[in-house]
Image (cartoon, helix red, strand yellow):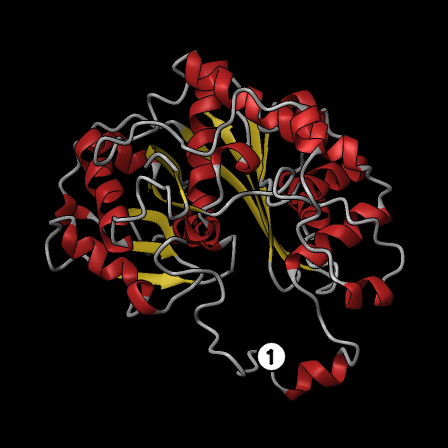
Amino acid sequence: MRDAVIVEAVRTPVGKGKPNGSLAHVHPVQLLAHTLRTLVERSGVDPVLIDDVIGGTVDQVGEQAMNTTRYAVLAAGFPETVPATTVDRQCGSSQQAVHFAAQGVISGAYDLVIACGVESMSRVPMWSNVPAGKDPFGPGVAERYPEGLVPQGISAELIAAKWSLTRARMDEFAVSSHHKAAAAWQAGLFDAEVAPLDGVARDESVRPDSTPEILAGLKPAYYDPGFGERFPQIEWNVTAGNASPVNDGASAVLITSSETAARLGLRPLARLHSFAVTGSDPLLMLTGVIPATEKVLHKAGLSLADIDLFEVNEAFASVVLAWQQETGADLTRVNVHGGAIALGHPLGASGTRLTTTLVHAMRSRGARFGLQTMCEAGGLANAMILEGV
């Protein structure tokens, strides 16, 4: 059987959202084009050999409309013959792109394919693809959920309440994310994965001096009396400090088979071992990482103890901590170079950003297996397992 391996993985530094972000001036097509160009330069492949480019973007409107990935391919200088498509599985869009790309290689549909993602939250804010007064859900969803669904921040609060996660615990986790990210930068552990852009060489949201005392002074980010009346169990512990920020960035990985890699003289970094995707309660929305982890481990024939490193997207501290309570995973193996609370969460780019970070972390630590999972709006989650080679 054919396999699928990652032979190169790069990302931009993750910029803060406007007004102070250093990448806010960069068009999203240019952000993604930069990673695509760097990817082929570092790998040494001739882009004419690329069978497809599959990109993830969440808010596909305005400057991120009209199949952003295709125009990034052209802006990167690839031959016009290289095709591209843009997919949407919300925050897991570019992780889904990895799944599709790897599955295409394993099936024989592709020999060489790029999975990637981009989001400029400065230039295309969240929900800008839903005009005011428009309903993206339709009457069938309203009939099935008559009390209505909720924003992700409220879901994060419901998760914190259900798993009895205190404000102090979530703030402690957030501080740890910043400290791990700062230590990784200090040790040069991101150097191999980051492609500096326009003078920006480091992730801008990392706060090395963050402390629990500082975070304790932040107000709840999603306090709403109406939701408080509907959900009296909410204690309003989610803040800007224990949630991911607004960011700009892009990332990309180059995927092929071991056979093609050998033929082209490419060095595999990791094998794409197993994949899973699952749906979950769209009210809690962000808990799908729990069944997705169980599902992908079952598919792989592995146990939690077999996994050396985990990347669990830190959309909110409550998501990762609830996942940890349910799975029993060792937090010292989770997001070892920091997560989205510190590094940032540029939506459509985050899936392949996590993959890029995981691949390089596995390489530097000699890890055998790594597991990546992401929660996604609507009650969805992706999970996959990488194997070191």
Q: Is residue 243 above or below residue 190?
A: below
Judged from this view, the residue extending furthest toward the right is: 232
Judged from this view, the residue extending furthest toward the top is: 187
Q: What residue type is labelled 1?
A: Phe
Q: In the image shown, does 331 or 255 lie closer to the viewer?
A: 331
* Quarter of the figure with residue 285: bottom right
* Quarter of the figure with residue 147: bottom right
Q: Is residue 335 above or below residue 87?
A: above
Q: Is residue 336 above or below residue 365?
A: below
Residue at image point 41% right, 46% down = 17
Residue 333 horizontal/vertical position (percent): 64, 23
Residue at image point 48% right, 33% down = 343
Residue 374 horizontal/vertical position (percent): 58, 46
Residue at image point 36% right, 41% down = 21
Q: Is residue 296 visible?
A: yes
Judged from this view, the residue extending furthest toward the bottom is: 139
In this rendering, position of residue 205 left or right of residue 48 = right
In this rendering, position of residue 145 left or right of residue 207 = right
Q: In the image shown, does 251 or 329 lie closer to the viewer?
A: 251
Residue at image point 49% right, 66% down = 127
Residue 249 horizontal/vertical position (percent): 36, 44
Name the secondary structure under disc 1.
loop
- Quadrant of image for the N terminus: top left
Q: How crowded is mark 1: few (under 14 residues within 10 Å), some or many (20 or more)?
A: few
Q: In the image shown, does 79 or 301 lie closer to the viewer?
A: 79
- Quadrant of image for the C terminus: top left
Q: Is residue 111 visible?
A: no
* Quarter of the figure with residue 129: bottom left
User: Which residue is label 1 attached to?
Assistant: 137
Residue 306 horizontal/vertical position (percent): 66, 25
